[in-house]
Image (spheres, helix red, strand yellow):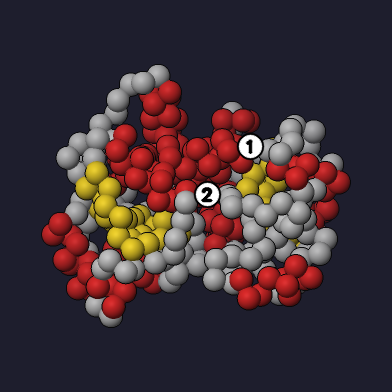
Amino acid sequence: MKHLITLKDITTDDFNNILKLAIKLKDENKKGIPHHLLKGKTLGMIFTKSSTRTRVSFEVGMYQLGGQALFLSSNDIQLGRGETIYDTANVLSRFLDGIMIRTFKQSDVEDLAKYGTIPIINGLTDLTHPCQALADFLTIYEEKKKLEGLKITYVGDGNNVTHSLLYAAALSGMNMSVATPKGFECDEEVVATALAMAKKTGAVLEFTNDPEKAVSGADSVYTDTWVSMGQESEKAEKVKKFDGYQVNEKLMGYAKEDAIFLHCLPAYRGFEVSEGVIDGRWSRVFDEAENRLHVQKAVMAMTMGDK
């Protein structure tokens, strides 16, 4: 792996190898065994979108790998003041061993990879969120001991998290059902790509406006905030349109008895999920959040490590 731009760009072997390495690094971390695979290396972290989990997990992860992380907000670099991505990519390639970027446009990540000479990791864009999906599938694997043939259901907005979950399901052979309100479906190009990928692994991807139908027989149920960062002005309207799409105890009753609940966080209890679900027996959200650290270490080691 040279970069992690989207999950559609990697192979099933890459996907499985990331999870295998993440499991190993997590086990070593719990046992106090150091794994300085990136000793002496530096990761630049570009943030034009703020974050709790992304910054802390990448910064701590780089420290645990023996390297150093450098936080770069849009106020700190010339990219936020009109410098071209071409120039930024070329300059930072002379200073750093890798870049993680959390931003709005997917094209910014792609252009950094195109013009720079160092590995680029997508920490989130408006279109995709690959590191989150990797952490999600690691959490499912830890719980279920397999991925292929299971069913994950996503209920809510067809957003960047949903898109990366579709790619992850297609890569791993997991079936996925997506329930969104009308007008909030997934990106058509993403859906077409995921369906083509799924043909190779036998994964079944389904799309509906009926949450109960989607959740029926699910091994894991997933939701995300209805109002993504930058969409705060749409909150009142979205809450009305998403009526009936809350993941609550009743909806979880349609899933398998041993189903788990996942959420990428931050969560807004009483909106997309009830307190009884996110704080109840189904929830694995904090395991999932921790797994961001370990899968991202695996991604950094596989892209920035000595080949």
Residue lying farthest to the bottom in this orientation? 82
Give the residue type that dot 2 points to: Ala
* Residue 189 position in % (x across, y down): 55, 70
- Residue placed at 71% from the left, 39% from the top? 279
Residue 115 located left or right of residue 103: left
Foreground: disc 1 or disc 2: 1
- Residue placed at 60% from the left, 58% from the top? 162
Residue 284 located left or right of residue 33: right
Q: Which residue is mark 2?
A: 133
* Residue 181 position in % (x across, y down): 75, 67
Instruction: Label 2, secondary structure: give it.
Output: helix
Establish if 278 lies above or below 235.
above
Labels 1 and 2: the sequence-earlier one: 2
Residue lying farthest to the top in this orientation? 31
Can the viewer see residue 119? no
Question: Of 161 and 58, which appears nearest the observer?
Answer: 58
Q: Which residue is mark 1?
A: 284
Give the residue type that dot 1 points to: Arg
